[in-house]
Image (cartoon, rainbow, N blue to C red):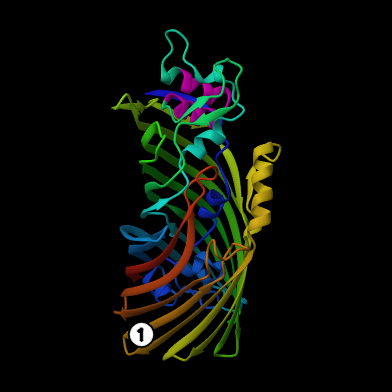
Amino acid sequence: MVISMAFCDAQNLTDGLRYSLEEPTGTARYTAMSGAFGALGGDFSALSINPAGGAVFLTNGGVLSLAILDRENNNTYFGTDTRSIDTDVNISQAGAIFVFDNANNESDWKKFTIGVNYNLNRNLSNDLFFQGTGNNSIDGFFLQQAQGIPLDLLQLRPGESISDLYDFLGETEGTSAQNALLGYQGYIFDPVSDDGGNTQYTSNIASGLFNQEYSKLSEGYVGKYTLNIATQYTDDYYFGINLNSHIIDYSESKLLFEANNNDGSLVKSVVFENNLSVLGSGFSAQIGGIAKIGDQFRLGINYDTPTWYTISEETTQFLETERLVDNQVLTERINPRVLNIYKDYQLRTPAKIGASAAYVLSEKGLISFDYNYKNYAGITFGPDADAYFQEQNRIIENNLQGASSYRLGGEYRIDRLSLRGGLRYEESPYQDEELMSSLEGFSLGLGYNGGNFHFDVAYARAEQSQKQQLYSVGLTDSASIDTIYSNVVLTLGFSL
């Protein structure tokens, strides 16, 4: 395989949003209460929203949580319904806390705590498949990529291989020229003129109906490693700060199969595959506070800075076409066997602010409410001087919006057993909610406290609808997708 140090013009709004959204996944107790923990603390995943919660812990301890995520997609594409399911198992949380009481009983500063925690911010595993018969072809994608590119750049020179030319175009012209090369060598289009300076092309696929199957398989996650430092002042105030290291590990494979029996079509079928691998690392910080109002009320406030990511990407492509020549079917397989390695780019996800309140009924139970706001229009690609990123940032600003999330959770204790439940509602990050609806969900859970250990289990379910566009240009038809997220979390913790 040839490795190409290419430059890319492919990052877009979808990528920025993928790494900016979050899920209330972590410990089972946190999940069972739909993440409504901003004013409570005392839970490891609560540290991920309000760092002051670290000072609520009374003793040293550690926790490990395992999550089973089931994602069911119900898809409709040109009137054809399909269903796809993906199940993934992850460590959703792991952490430890150390409590240091102040030996000076006269001091108002009662204690400080140091915690380390890993939390799964978002599981990116998905299996998406849909099919249908439309009237737009993949030829539109390749034609738009090719128009304006001189024919001379798409033709092989003596002794030059597809890999050589594909590599060269990636280093000098970018991904559009590479896509144009695939389409030209796969006979999807021909030049209007055989002159080497020709920049206009015409399709070899006639208009009509097209049977299409589209699949997108993805794996990966967005995770956050946290160093938490918190303190308690008098009996009523808690303050904390988080220093966070973020990681992105994501891969996806998109495959389109298209076939037609249209009169005049030279090309009868197309298989187009695109593979993407992403690694990223980032940094953010959080500050927060919790105040007791009397014996029963708690108020919380928190602020998350933007997360500053540095991201690297690699891609590979493959194209196969079948064409009819003199009543014979000829197959063209265009496999450059080139790994495109792109220059690292920057991504800044938006800041978040939150406020929360809780009512604690002695040892019997509690009810808690969290509100958070994040302006997704603030997602920004960099370097700032890059013209392509400037255009993408304008698109993001014109299409995304600020969105609020609301979480309500409750817990009731019966001796050592705890019963839990929660509700969540998250507004769409899109100005046009047909592209992605608001999310609604609920959660349930049980917990058993054995003294020095506790075991918890939770189930959470949420629903959301969105549009999946096949390609950004040319073949821009979309499928309607209704997704059901089902999450089971198991947690085992201990205290010393």
Q: Where residue 211 appears, x then y in whole percent?
A: 36, 47
Residue 427, percent across and down?
A: 57, 70
- All told, the count of numbered labels is 1
**Which secondary structure class fits the magenta region best?**
helix
Residue 328 is situated, as x and y percent measured from the top left of the image, at 28, 26
Residue at image x 37%, y 79%?
Answer: 444
Residue at image location 47% in from the left, 87% down from the top: 366
Camera-nearest residue between 427 and 140: 140
Q: Nearer the viewer, residue 295 or 22?
A: 22
Read off the residue under disc 1: 419
Say whether residue 453 is left or right of residue 309: left
In the rendered image, is residue 10 in sight? yes
Please say whether residue 102 is visible from this viewpoint. no
Residue at 45% x, 72% y is 43
Crowding at mark 1 (Cα within 10 Å: few <14, some 14-19, many 20+): some
Q: Quadrant of the N terminus?
A: top left
Where are the magenta residues, as a range?
A: 165-185
Whether residue 92 is situated above or below residue 405 in the rendered picture:
above
Q: Does residue 169 belong to the magenta stretch? A: yes
Could you tell me the amino acid type at mark 1? Leu
Of 274 and 219, nearer the camera is: 274
Q: Look at the picture and state if 491 lies above or below 225.
A: below
**Quarter occupied by residue 195:** top right
| Residue 183 lies in the magenta-colored region | yes
